């Protein structure tokens, strides 16, 4: 009897042994940082060794911090640009590349997806050179193509268009379009290829035009993937850091036009040295992300009901 019990415990011990490395990684790199950041959010730090308990002062200071709200506004504008410019373009590209009449579809898919093959830091450095005021490729091209017809108000030529001085957020959105439109296009393309052709044929026989087929057949079929892509874009946009940090040389740009919430968190924690205030910003951002995820889940379940 005892031998049978001992044998039954062997598989359990083996399971715990195999789970131990994963559990240790979660404990050290997930649970401990979460607990530590929660404690830090209620403290004020002066360097790595000096801490003072301040209660909710970090959160109340944040509510009246104009720089924090500037970062929130910039992040929201970038997120809206991702949702209402980037995703519709990705869907249009996916529908165009899903057409069997288009030749060389594989080549076009590779071209649009290829920006994902480059690192974001490299893209940021390259974009900084391209959007430079006078020697940049963007202004040089605009001057060649449009300079003879019309110049922006207040500028002598397109060469003087100050992308990184006066139009920082528009520049970030344009760079993100180039980076992520092809990435989101792949998701939409996979969803479009799963749409039942018989439903499209039936809708066409019933007299539905292209808009009607898209609205009543294609859109409901790709809605689960669309919800996933929307959530992925929102999370990625709210966590924007590398692109503006490298593009603007570690600052928020003129007037903090390119400052994001994660950039402000980094500046507060690692440049100013107040890890408590940075932890409070991080928890506010986490609550925003959790709230958006719950809202998205509620919307999806309501549509399915």
Image (cartoon, helix red, strand yellow):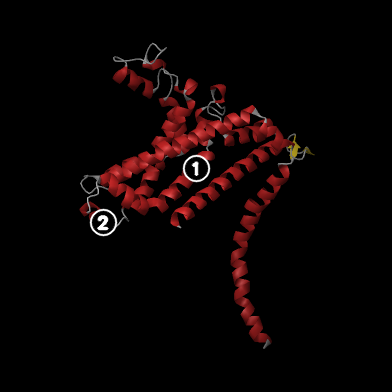
Mark 1 secondary-structure assignment: helix
Please provide percent x and percent y for residue 45.
74, 36
Q: Report whether 115 appears left or right of 164.
A: left
User: Quadrant where the N terminus lies?
Assistant: bottom right
Q: Is residue 278 above or below residue 138?
A: below
Q: Quadrant of residue 17?
A: bottom right
Q: Is residue 114 above or below residue 258?
A: below
Q: Residue at x 43, y 25 (%)?
A: 129
Mark 2 secondary-structure assignment: helix
Q: Residue at x 40, y 26 (%)?
A: 130
- Labelled pair 2, 1 in contact (Cβ < 8 Å): no
Return the residue nearer the eye: 277 or 215. Answer: 215
Q: Residue at x 73, y 45 (%)?
A: 39
Q: Report whether 113 appears left or right of 257.
A: left
Please provide percent x and percent y for residue 66.
63, 27
Q: Report whether 244 appears left or right of 268.
A: left
Return the residue nearer the eye: 34 or 197. Answer: 197
Return the residue nearer the eye: 157 or 299. Answer: 299
Please provide percent x and percent y for residue 199.
27, 57
Q: Earlier in the sequence, mark 2 or mark 1?
A: 2
Mark 2, other Cα within 10 Å: few <14 / some 14–19 / many ≥20: few
Q: Which residue is mark 1?
A: 234
Residue 114 appears in the rendering: no
| Separation (CA) of disc 2 from disc 1 | 31 Å
Q: Which mark is residue 197?
A: 2
């Amino acid at each position: 009897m005892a031998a049978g019990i001992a044998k039954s415990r062997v598989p359990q011990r083996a399971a715990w042994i195999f789970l131990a490395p994963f559990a240790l990684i979660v404990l050290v790199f997930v649970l401990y940082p979460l607990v530590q950041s929660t404690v830090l959010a209620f403290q004020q730090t002066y360097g790595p060794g000096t801490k003072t308990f301040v209660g909710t002062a970090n959160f109340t200071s944040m509510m009246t911090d104009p720089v924090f709200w500037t970062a929130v506004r910039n992040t929201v504008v970038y997120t809206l640009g991702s949702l209402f410019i980037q995703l519709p373009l990705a869907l249009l590209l996916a529908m165009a590349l899903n057409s069997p009449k288009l030749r060389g579809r594989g080549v076009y898919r590779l071209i649009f997806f290829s920006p994902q093959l480059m690192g974001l830091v490299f893209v940021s450095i390259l974009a900084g050179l391209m959007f430079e005021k006078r020697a940049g490729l963007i202004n040089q091209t605009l001057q060649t193509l449009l300079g003879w017809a019309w110049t922006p108000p207040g500028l002598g030529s397109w060469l003087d268009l100050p992308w990184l001085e006066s139009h920082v957020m528009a520049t970030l959105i344009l760079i993100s379009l180039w980076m992520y439109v092809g990435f989101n296009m792949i998701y939409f393309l996979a969803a479009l290829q799963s749409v039942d052709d018989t439903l499209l044929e039936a809708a066409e026989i019933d007299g539905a035009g292209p808009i009607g087929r898209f609205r009543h057949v294609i859109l409901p079929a790709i809605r689960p993937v669309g919800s996933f892509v929307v959530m992925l874009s929102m999370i990625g946009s709210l966590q924007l850091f590398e692109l503006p940090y490298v593009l603007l040389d570690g600052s928020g740009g003129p007037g903090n036009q390119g400052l994001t919430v994660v950039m402000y968190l980094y500046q507060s924690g690692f440049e100013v040295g107040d890890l408590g205030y940075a932890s409070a910003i991080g928890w506010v951002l986490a609550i925003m992300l959790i709230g958006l995820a719950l809202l998205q889940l509620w919307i999806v379940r309501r549509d399915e009901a």
